[in-house]
Image (cartoon, grey):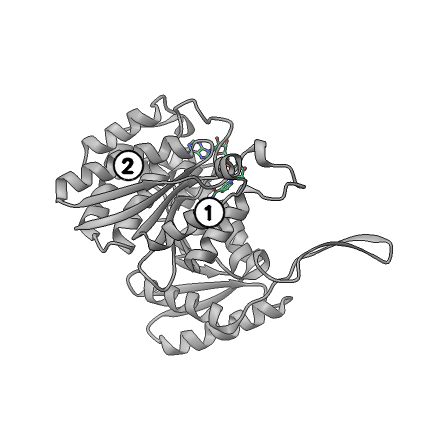
Amino acid sequence: MNFNITLLPGDGIGPEIIAETVTVLETIAGKYGHTFNFTELLMGGCSIDKYGSSLTDETLADCQSADAVLLGAVGGPKWDDPKAKDRPERGLLALRKGLGVFANLRPVKVHPALVDSSPLKPEKLQGVDILVIRELTGGLYFGWPKGRDVKDGRERAVDTLEYYDYEIRRVMELAFSLAKGRKKKVTSVDKANVLESSRLWRQIAVQVGAENPDIELEHTLVDTASMRLITGPAWMDVIVTENMFGDILTDEASVLAGSMGMLPSASLGAGKNGLYEPIHGSAPDIAGKGIANPIGTILSSAMMLRHSFGLETEAAAIENAVDATITAGARTADLGGMLTTKQMTAEIINKL
Ligand code: NAD
């Protein structure tokens, strides 16, 4: 089969981990008889430097027409000026919105060989296998009005947390459909005791729950959920939540896996075209050293094969190769080892 993939390496360690992931995908293409056509474009800080915009119209159009988009990471101290007209993160939000990817899937599994890399006690990590689904194109990050002004002689800042019923329903339906292939349990996270938007969230969760009687639905307040992720994570399976709560909870959940560098994500919309990226940022502290862990990005490419291309066998081959590599003791610096990005990738390719 033939697929067009747009690569957005971005900033910091982004280009290092994307280049390695391409070698994994080329190995898969050769082994299973597929053709992956790669188009590499600028996005984020590097695009601001070259074009004066974190995401140009041309780049967005290319991403929209591709079969999938694979992103490294964007941002860094060079583009951190809060007064700047454009920032790398704006490009990322515009890309998500432009692709219509309303749900971000972040699987968090703890590899048995890595329990010692996590700050949690090993017994708390037994059997942890969570899928967090974060609403991605609504809520506080997109609501209007937002901005700063001076009111009654005081400097003021405003953000708006807004949700429409259809935005909640489509992500909730996705959560229930993915729960069917797992433990048949959905935990909906909200703040319904305080926020009006959360009361609508819970109302829709109950409606979708009634349409899926084979799935157990529970509601948890976000403060309780953040506590339970640390005190009893094995008890959770599919978690579905709004944009900002998901942003925070997924970073918290990443601690369970031992390193941010291990975790992949997929952002999906109504069509097949998805956006795939590791959950970590551009890691400016280690950029250019060749020591970044490529696994989060390599596993994101496996999610791309599964969700956008329907290549389940090939996706599982990558995941099994990563599993076997970790089991065999291969470790980059974030996991307490000495392997470079290239050496870790070579170990994974050897096991494909
Ligand atoms: P970060 O995720 O880049 O780094 C946090 C820590 O984890 C650092 O010590 C880093 O070295 C380490 N780390 C991250 N990925 C790693 C990997 N693959 N291998 C080994 N170690 C890894 O978060 P930050 O430092 O808060 O942010 C840095 C920049 O990234 C900021 O500009 C931020 O805005 C941006 N950012 C971008 C994204 C994205 O592109 N989706 C996400 C988060 C942060």
Amino acid tagged 2: Val
In the image: residue 224, left or right of residue 307: right
Q: Is mark 2 within 8 Å of ligand 1?
A: no
Which label belongs to residue 22?
2
Under circle 1, the secondary element is helix
Mark 1 → mark 2, Cα distance in angstroms = 27 Å
In the image: residue 121, left or right of residue 302: right
Under circle 2, the secondary element is helix
Residue drawn at 45 percent across, 71 percent down = 169
| Closer to viewer: mark 1 or mark 2 | 2
Q: Residue furthest right?
A: 153
Q: Earlier in the sequence, mark 1 or mark 2?
A: 2
In the image: residue 214, left or right of residue 245: left
Q: Are marks 1 and 2 in contact (CB under 8 Å)?
A: no
Q: Is residue 167 above or below residue 98?
A: below
Which label belongs to residue 8?
none
Image coordinates for residue 203, horizontal then vertical, percent = 51, 75
Amino acid tagged 1: Ala
Image coordinates for residue 75, horizontal then vertical, percent = 52, 37
**Would residue 294 be visible to someone looking at this image?**
no
In the image: residue 175, left or right of residue 311: right
Which residue is the site of mark 1? 253
Query: Tag 1: Cα neighbours inside 10 Å, few (<14), some, or many (≥20)?
Result: many
